[in-house]
Amino acid sequence: MKKFLSILLSVIIAFSLSVTIFAKSTDDKCDCGNIPVIFVTGFAYTELVANAGTEDEYGAFGVEPEAITDMITGLIAPLLWMLVSRDFDYFAHRLSADVMELFYDASCDENGVPKNPTVDIERFNPPTAEHYKDDYFTFRYDWRKDLFELAAELNDYIEDTKRLTKHDKVAIRAESMGGAVTMTYLKAYGYDSVETVVMQSSAFDGISTITSLFLGDLTINSQSLVNYIGNFMEGNAPDMVFYRAIYLSLAKFVFNPVVALLSAFIGSIDEIVYDECIKPLFGYIPGLWAFVTPEAYEDAKAFMLDEEVNAELIKKIDRYRYEVQDKRDEIIADAMANGVGFAILSNYGKGALPIGEDSVVQSDFLIETEHTSLGATCANYGETLGEDYVQAVNDGHNHLSSDGMIDASTCSFPEITWFVKDMMHTWYTDGYDEFVYKLIYNEGQETVHTFPEYPQFLVNNQETEALEPLTTENSDTQSTKVNIFALISTWIEQIKNAE
Ligand SMILES: [Zn+2]
Ligand SMILES: [Zn+2]
């Protein structure tokens, strides 16, 4: 009897042990079906604070309006003196010194090391065990840092997310500079922890207008200034079309003389301002070098930095340039070969920043479409590729947009690159998010042929905030055709509503 009992007991123990082990292994993984999503933010998304975490915390980059007012007031006398004496140099020295002081807390030394060691970001939104569908954890970072340092921080964040949510993999949606951080992460830590990457207006190929700044080209292009300010006139409501038509017919006459005057002024102070302010302020921040385009990198380095003085900094930025930016096509192809679903979302239909000779190009308001799409052939802003234009690479698909502005066949990855017209850089809508989550929750590698409702070319409907397939009917997002009857009834409506 005793023997029987002991056998029974051991069977029960063994069984319950195996049950515990079995239960534990299922418990260890979450089977909710909603992969945790990490949102890798862009440049300056999170504020820098000095004396981080103490009572004396204050903004280190978002400079207080009072400080700017003080600076401008202090510069009035030197400015007047300059106008009387034509002594531009004195003003340039004063301006440079004031700006350097204003941004001291956010600036770095010649090695790319922050000058004020108490400056950090506010690290809220850490990952949690709870995770929901159509939601994300926000990865914030100090965007001044070198990209490999940021990739290490992202790796910790991803590992924490996996451990807390009990998922083996995460999905990444990366915007703007976050695209460069994500590429560096994939290069340094591989693909095992990532199921999907959605690049949203990614800076992985640099930004031409920022590159102009790093090449010493401070030309203000008056046509692109017209385009840039016009970006804020969105939609085709009858009154907006009217204001746009007036604006476009008058803007050049107003801007041309102002820009000419401003350019002459910049031309007489830029050498001193570069040496005493722009180079040590912007050039010494490692993270900003992610925005320099690959072709111009060596020239920009030679212009902005000194091989000996900045040797330590150059080592850091060279590593990103040659191990990540240069290898970006390889990294993406390799990620896909290792089972990572990859999607590149690029916006167009907006004028670029008005810095530099070549800033009349197609853009999302901040990064040129050519760069966020990895090589699309784009007509200049407001123009088309021309009636006679033929798709550059014939792969059996149509990769030409119906508005004649984009040829996607020259992209590094034409089958996984989508274009959203009339969408500002990172000002996303519910319709855009819907598409991103569709890409994230759908299994496998999607292409521009996967969803009928999401073909290669989409347009952001300004009224409904939905993404729609681009057609010849909805492609004129910058209409100047004034409908006088619609305009008058809109005004009558507005007067009625005001009463
Ligand atoms: Zn889950
Ligand atoms: Zn194709």
Image: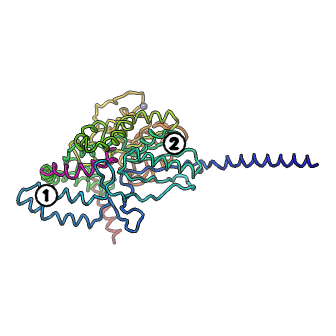
Q: Dot 1 surroundings within 10 Å: few (below 14), some, or many (20 or more)?
A: many
Which stretch did the figure color magenta?
Answer: 268-289
Question: Is residue 187 or residue 473 the one in the foreground?
Answer: 187
Whole-percent x, y for residue 482 in the image: 27, 53
Left or right, 19 with reference to 388: right
Residue identifier under label 2: 194
What kind of secondary structure does the magenta stretch mostly adopt? helix
Q: Eyeballing the image, is 282 above or below 118? A: above
Question: Is residue 24 or residue 218 the one in the foreground?
Answer: 24
Q: Dot 2 surroundings within 10 Å: few (below 14), some, or many (20 or more)?
A: many
Between circles 1 and 2, the one closer to the viewer is: 1
Type of the residue with mark 2: Val
Q: Mark 2 or mark 1, which is nearer the start of the sequence?
A: 1
Whole-percent x, y for residue 465 in the image: 42, 53
- Colour setup of the view: rainbow
State how far apart marks 1 and 2 are (Cα).
52 Å
Q: Is residue 278 magenta?
A: yes
Question: Is residue 99 or residue 374 the one in the foreground?
Answer: 99
Instruction: Tell me which residue sits at (27%, 35%) in the image.
Output: 386
Left or right, 492 with reference to 184: left
Residue identifier under label 1: 91
